[in-house]
Amino acid sequence: MPKRRDVLKFGLLAGAAAALPVERLTSAFAQPATAAASAAPTIKLFETQLVVPPVLKPTHTIAGTDYYDITMRVAQQEIIPDLETTIWGYNGIFPGPTIRARRNRPIVIRQHNKLPSEAAVHLHGGNVPSSSDGLPGQEIAPGKDRHYLYPNRQQATTLWYHDHVHHHEAFNTYQGLTGLYLITDPAEDKLGLPSGKYDVPLVIQDRSFNADGSFRLPDPNLGEFAGEVAVINGRPSPRFTVEQRRYRFRLLNGSSADCLHELTLGSGDTMHVIGTDGGLLAVPVAVSKLPLAPSERAEVIVDFSKYPVGSQIVLNSSVFGTPMQLLRFDVVKSHSGHPKLPSKLVPIQRLKESQAKVHRDFQLNLDKARGEMVINGKSFDPDRIDIRPKLGSTEVWTIFNGETPDLPIPHVFHTHLVRFQILDRDGNPPAPFESGWKDSVTVMPGERVRIIMRFADHPGRFLYHCHLLGHADAGMMATMFVTP
Ligand code: C2O
Ligand code: CU
Ligand code: CU
């Protein structure tokens, strides 16, 4: 496996960044225009229609387990009208096909790697056995395949799968290796939420393009790069025709770099958050502004019944103050009634600090001297076990972003295997919309976030890392071994 450790060092970035004003450091969106950027194709907003990724059908079912086949391959896709983009896609599409799973009904996916390099598939947010987690050492060589077993013993939620080859994670994901994995269950069914064509996934990603339509990546080794074009379900700022009724949107920020979105509706109206990373909330939470960091999911209900036919409502975002228009909703007449917004969703069992016998501290920062991204001073070593949580135990983790004001880098802390609840941010309770189940949490420079989790099943080796994939590739990742 080619090692990119050396070229991934962040020393250069740190040096270049020091010359820029502080507010520009954290996002490549603010990079000054370069010659390459001016050669980019003209992209018209809302020119294309939103595409919803197809739902994949199982190839067969044996004893209640559904079997799927996916081939990872290089393909051409029309992302910008009349231009072809070479992508790496699950089944050759970007985003990949959506898997719809049912709670307690296992799925086995056979992944064939027809890419020119190694691949590893990780089901983000999945409570899965270690052997199916996509860990270092489990890479699929070109031409080979691997079976992943997903037990789906977890509540209804929006998960996603993406590549996880260490040192290549940001690059591979940027090339297109992302897809959705939705779990449903009876508790969710009972709520009568908008379903079918009114239940729409929106995968938000950043890309940059060359004049010929190919993805632009100034340095394929530098995963920290963020594109200036918002791509929704693989199309640049598309439009979507909606009826005058309620919709459920499953938002995923699938960006590889530091695109911390803050979503708002152009109408100024609120949306109701009904779910986050690990499942539905206890009650819907009205928000007018919704932060969504890379790898986070939020499910929202948007009510278009109050807008006259012909209205156009834009889903806006701001990334470190840079405004972006992600998607336009064009309102047409509804032909049916629409479901109510339930007042209660699903009960959430609060994990109590008093149950936790183990407390751990994690400091995340850039080690400028070594040019590496580190957790507690160490960069990732696949042969080292960093912590050993005990199966059945509850733990409280304090995540501290140790970046200093001269280089204020945000981090997004993610745990494999377990979902968690946020106890507090700098001592303050989390906002209502992030008080449910999470697997990723933004930790701003100087901030301290405490999370609580229970290791209920699956012993063995798993990872935790920063989900700005360039940071993970540069070392901000560690191994936990859950001991039986
Ligand atoms: Cu989406 Cu290791 O993560
Ligand atoms: Cu994960
Ligand atoms: Cu980070």
Image (cartoon, rainbow, N blue to C red):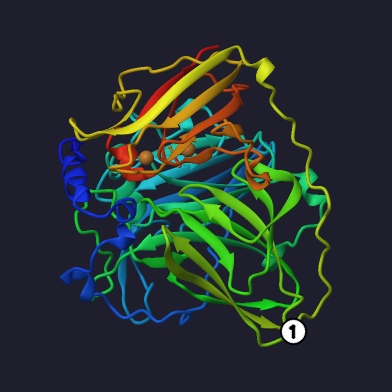
Q: Relative to 107, is 331 above or below?
A: below
Disc 1 marks a residue whose amino acid type is Lys
Q: Position of residue 401 (x, y in %)?
A: 41, 34
Q: Which residue is drawn at 31% across and 24% down?
A: 382
Q: Which residue is drawn at 42% across and 36% down?
A: 446
Q: In which quarter of the image is residue 56?
A: bottom right
Q: Where is residue 28 in the image (x, y as percent from the top left)?
A: 30, 57
Residue identifier under label 1:
333
Q: Position of residue 227 (x, y in %)?
A: 33, 62
Secondary element under disc 1, as helix, strand or loop, is: loop
Q: Relative to 382, is 110 above or below?
A: below
Question: The C terminus appears in which quarter of the rendering?
Answer: top right
Q: In which quarter of the image is residue 217?
A: bottom left
**Front in this rendered view, residue 333 or 13:** 13
**Front in this rendered view, residue 244 or 140:** 244
Name the quadrant where ligand 3 sits: top left
- In the rendered structure, the answer to whether residue 44 lies left or right of residue 240 reads left
Q: How many labels does the image show?
A: 1
